[in-house]
Amino acid sequence: MLPEYRSHRAEAAKSLVLFAPAGPPDPVRLEQGLAVVREECPAVAALLKYDIGEVTAPFPWLHGPDRHQAESFCMLMQESSAGFAWAARGGYGILRWMDRVRWDRVSDTSPVVVGFSDVTLLHAALNARGVASLHGPMPCTLSSTSRKSRQALWEFFESGRLPVLAGSLCVAGQGTVTGRLAGGNLCSLIHLIGTPFEPPWQRSILVIEDVNEPIYKIDRMLTHLLQSHRLDSVAGIVVGEFSGTGESDAMLFRLLEDRLGGLGVPVVCGFPVGHGENNMPFLLGSTYTLDAQALTLVPHAGR
């Protein structure tokens, strides 16, 4: 039996609301994703509700005006009948309206936010306020996500169960550490430094992943984290997929060892999370154990 995220959401069937916090969802990819849900998990499909709608955005890369986006998110976070708030896609846009949100109205009783990429920004703000959220596939990515990752997502939606994740290589540090997960998309995390929405760095197990960032930019972002002292107190680092770097995995591993090896904490690579086909769900803001020898990331029962 896998550990479970035990909460009011796992005890009763509640609606799963789709929302568009960042870029405008492509209708074809959205429908492809929803077709996957209907085929593979009718129980989840039956709970789906939509909060996307037609909105006039000021720019084509945004789903809607900042004020509308913030107000919609605030209303969704107070929706007592919703168990999950599932982002339709990432892209860009959340950073524009985060400062308009009444974060004091968001709590453990709010729906669990689900998504990755730009949704990292919401994860960070929520986790900093003690609210857990799920890093995982979104409807617009489902058709290109592995079946194993999708099945793990259905398991979480239906029962709160979370998978044990396996890495492939420890590039620095050793031992076993326990802490609350923080992080997500590396580029998004960098843009939170100096804002009120940074994730809780201290004693966290930091997860990082990214896509289509040249290797020198990854170097720059890691160096930024180091020189801003955000990594001084982390317990360990979990590295997901970094695709589209223009270099080999061996070069990426060398860079990670060079930049992160001096921290004295376990840095384990190769976890199946990120923008690729394998994007296993994990609960940010909840407690996990990272084992540098076994190369595993294990969720704790409960939170």
Image (tube, rainbow, N blue to C red):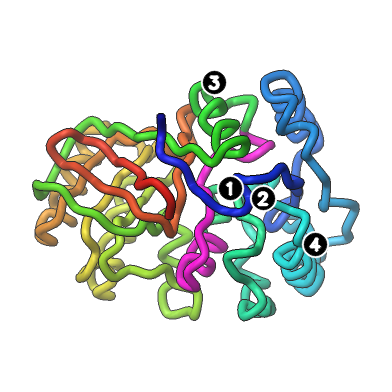
Q: CA distance from mark 4 to mark 2?
A: 21 Å
Tell which tag, 2 or 3, sits nearer the viewer.
Answer: 2
Q: CA distance from mark 4 to mark 1?
A: 18 Å
Residue 29 vs residue 163, the one in the foreground: 163
Tell which tag, 2 or 1, sits nearer the viewer.
Answer: 2
First in sequence: mark 2 vs mark 3:
2
SS type, badge 2 = strand
First in sequence: mark 4 vs mark 1:
4
Is residue 170 visible in the rendered image? The answer is: yes
Q: Which residues are magenta?
A: 121-141
Checking the image for residue 49, the label placed there is none
First in sequence: mark 4 vs mark 2:
4
Q: Which residue is mark 3?
A: 147
Total marks shown come to 4
Q: Which residue is mark 2?
A: 84
Checking the image for residue 115, the label placed there is 1
Tell which tag, 4 or 1, sits nearer the viewer.
Answer: 1
Q: CA distance from mark 2 to mark 3?
A: 21 Å
**Residue 279: image x %, image y %?**
47, 34
Q: Which residue is mark 4?
A: 64
Q: Are marks 4 and 2 in contact (CB under 8 Å)?
A: no
Callout 1, which amino acid? Gly
